[in-house]
Amino acid sequence: MDWAYLSPAAVLEPGERTGSYRLGTDELVVDAEGNSAISMEDVAVALLDEAERPRHHRTRFTVGY
């Protein structure tokens, strides 16, 4: 069975959909100042991108700005 597990950034809040995000593996995705955040709308985009074009098989991945 193939699976993937998406872990969002540390701060997950409603916001604007930018359609842009960065991917990581086992570590939080953080910006230059050490902040880890993403909007719920962009997590949805990342999840749909993974469903439509799977890149992570039997692994966890993270998303953030």
Image (tube, rainbow, N blue to C red):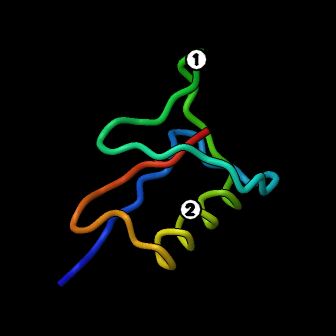
x and y percentages locating residue 31 in the rendered image: 58, 25
Residue highlighted by disc 1:
32
Q: Residue at x 77, y 52 (%)?
A: 18
In the figure, 17 relative to 27: above or below? below
Of callouts 2 and 1, the N-terminal one: 1
Q: 56 or 64, which lies in front?
A: 56
The amino acid type found where label 1 is placed reads: Ala
Give neighbour class at mark 1: few <14, some 14-19, many 20+ (Cα, 10 Å).
few
Of helix, strand and loop, which one carries label 1? loop
User: In the displayed image of the protein, which residue is found farthest to the right?
Assistant: 16
Q: Please indicate whether residue 27 sits to the left or right of residue 62 in the image.
A: left
Q: Residue at x 56, y 73 (%)?
A: 48
User: In the displayed image of the protein, which residue is found farthest to the top?
Assistant: 33
The amino acid type found where label 2 is placed reads: Ala
Of helix, strand and loop, which one carries label 2? helix
In the figure, 45 relative to 10: above or below? below
x and y percentages locating residue 14 in the rendered image: 74, 54
Placement of the C terminus among the 4 image quadrants: top right
Q: Tag on residue 46?
A: 2
